[in-house]
Image: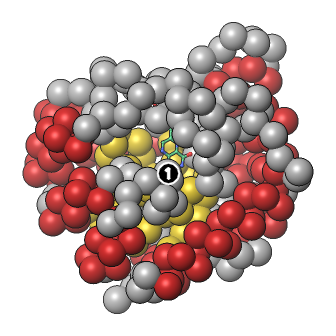
Amino acid sequence: MQSIEERFPRPSVMGIVNVTPDSFFDGGVNFDPEAAATSARRMVEEGAAIVDVGGESTRPGSEGVSVEEELRRVAPVLERLGGEVPLSIDTSKAEVARRAVQLGAELVNDVTALRGDHDMAEVVAGSGAYLCLMHMLGEPRTMQHDPRYDDVVSDVVAFLEERLSVATAAGIAEERICVDPGIGFGKTVEHNVELLNRLGEVASLGRPVVVGASRKRFLGRMLGEPAATEGPMPASIAAAVIAVAAGATMVRVHDVRETVEALQS
Ligand code: HH2
């Protein structure tokens, strides 16, 4: 079995396909399974190493959806793409992850880092899938209400280290795991910038680092729009290039073609 760094060498691009009506950037665009499958195929043609399919928005303030609803959204997309497109499933629900792996997903991207569902670690361990452990402070509904840290980078690194121990203790091989500082998940603009500037400290955990800054509101807010709910493409591409230069292995993006071009130049 290949390690995650062999399977997805640095730099790799992960394309985002949200099968949701309400994701902050592509909400509604890929809600139809056929449209979602077409987007995913296009992203791979444009150079994505993998496509992350999600059925629940985690934008600030969002409420969750049920297992049934999440499966109803993602299963038809995975059925269309399994075996054809390298797939990741963006879920914190064990049952969704289990079904997704059956349908061909090779990576489980859990924004709760195995804290959202007691059965998730066992499902990932048993399936042999790769795993992404992401840092989030609090939960999407409230995470942007005055987030505070002693030192955001040290706190995130300590959290990821602890979640790595939990994952390996549950039988998930370390070489199958990557980590993600969770840009925008319970972080101010300054916290996000600090994490990007000091990404090397996250990489010092010895695991590949994934960074998802694409289109996030902090990019719009940095550019002088205090009420921005999304960020512009050029800033997203710059953030991806900065992240890779600072040690990221994989960037999770909406604009695959433009990001791949920027990373090649
Ligand atoms: N960001 C989002 C969702 N999943 N997974 C990882 N590993 N890293 C991230 O930064 C990350 C993630 C949020 O972005 P998006 O999926 O575009 O929006 P929404 O949650 O509204 O569907």
Q: Amino acid at mark 1?
A: Val
Mark 1 sits near ligand 1, with its Cβ under 8 Å away: yes
Q: Is residue 233 visible?
A: no
Residue 6 place in picture, x, y as percent: 47, 80
Image-based side of 133 in relation to 98, left or right:
right
Q: Quadrant of residue 35?
A: top left
Front-most of 60 and 213? 60
Secondary structure at badge 1 equals: loop
> For mark 1, what is the residue?
111
Residue located at (78% from left, 58% from top): 155
Residue 127 place in picture, x, y as percent: 26, 76
Image-based side of 97 in relation to 240, left or right:
left
Around disc 1, counting alpha carbons within 10 Å, would you say few (fewer than 14), some (14 to 19), or many (20 or more)? Answer: many
Front-most of 173 and 244? 173
Report the colour scheme.
secondary structure
Q: Quadrant of residue 180?
A: bottom right
